[in-house]
Amino acid sequence: EPEVTQTPSHQVTQMGQEVILRCVPISNHLYFYWYRQILGQKVEFLVSFYNNEISEKSEIFDDQFSVERPDGSNFTLKIRSTKLEDSAMYFCASSTPYNEQFFGPGTRLTVL
Amino acid sequence: LAKTTQPISMDSYEGQEVNITCSHNNIATNDYITWYQQFPSQGPRFIIQGYKTKVTNEVASLFIPADRKSSTLSLPRVSLSDTAVYYCLVGDITDSWGKLQFGAGTQVVVTP
C-alpha cells in the first residue's frame, strides 16, 4: 500500500536555527499538507499546497515558515529561526481531490 | 466548519463493541462526517466517511440519523490494538482545499 514518508523521524535543534522537514507524498496525489501536534494537544493545520503554490495557511504559519516542492517527489517545510514553542510533531499529508488525507509518521522536532 | 462534541474518553474490554457518538448540531447541507484514528506518536489515519444513513467498511460502521445532527462510529469486537484517539470531523470536503480541523478526540482504551 502506498504511504507518505517523512524524514527525519526526530530532529533536535538549537533555538534560532533553521530546520527543514522533508516529506515524500503518495505519488499520484495532488494536494499536500502540513500539520503539527504539540505534545498532549490536538492536531493543528498549518498549510495546504496545490499546483506549486500555497492554497491556504493558518495563523500559525507565519513568515518563519515556508513550504516548497523542490522536485517531483519531495515536499518540504522550512522553519527559518526555530523557537522553543515550535517543538512538536509535524505531520505531512497528501490526498487526491475530495478524498481522504493520508498522513505520514511524523517528525518530532525538539528545540532546545 | 461545524463544531463537534464527542466524549473525552471511553474504556472497553477486548471483544466488545465500542460506539462513539459525535454531536454536530450546526452541520451544513454540504458537510460530510469523517472519522480519523490516531495511535500514539503516529499520524492520523482515515477510518470512514459518510453523508447520511449508514456506511460500513472492513474497519467500522458509521450511523447517521436523518437529521444528521449527530453520528455514531461503531467499532465491532475491539482488540487491544484499537486503543487510540478517535476524531470526528465535519466539513465540506470540496471546500477549503480539504483542510482538516481536529478537535480533542475521544481516547479509547481497550483492556484485556
Image (cartoon, rainbow, N blue to C red):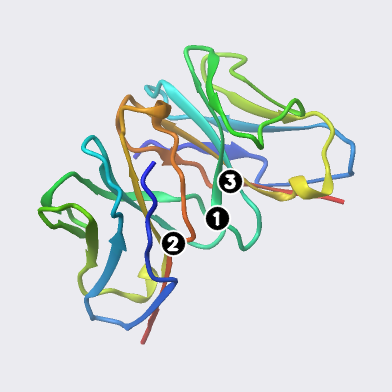
The residue closer to the viewer here, A63 or A92, is A63
Q: Amino acid at mark 1?
A: Lys
Q: Name which of mark 1 and mark 3 comes first in the sequence.
A: 1
Assign a secondary structure to mark 2. loop
> Is disc 1 on the same chain as disc 2?
no
* Percent coordinates x, y for residue A74 in the rendering: 57, 23
**B59 on left or right of A96:** left
Residue A53 in the figure: left or right of residue B30 = right
Instruction: Tell me how far mark 2 sits from mark 3, CA to CA.
Output: 19 Å
Q: Nearer the viewer, residue B105 or B109?
A: B105
Residue type, numbered disc 2: Gly
Residue A28, quarter of the rendered image: top left
Find residue B33 and report its horizontal and vertical position in percent: 27, 47
Q: Which residue is mark 1?
A: A42
Q: Distance between the Cα atoms at labels 2 and 1?
A: 8 Å
Residue matched to label 2: B105
Does the CB distance between marks 1 and 3 fall below 8 Å?
no
Residue that lies at the very extreme toward the front in this rendered image: B26
Q: Which residue: 39% across, 32% down?
A: B98
User: CB under 8 Å between callouts 2 and 1?
Assistant: yes
A56 or B12: which is nearer to us? A56
Q: Chain of mark 3?
A: A
Q: Residue sitting at 44 percent across and 34 percent down?
A: B99
Q: Position of residue A101 (x, y in %)?
A: 39, 37
Instruction: Identify residue type, mark 3.
Output: Gly
- Element under disc 1: loop
Q: Is residue B23 left or right of residue B17?
A: right
- The 10 Å Cα crowd at callout 3, few under 14, some 14 to 19, many 20 or more, is many
* Rendered view: B80 above or below A23: below
Which residue does the numbered mark 3 point to in the structure image?
A106
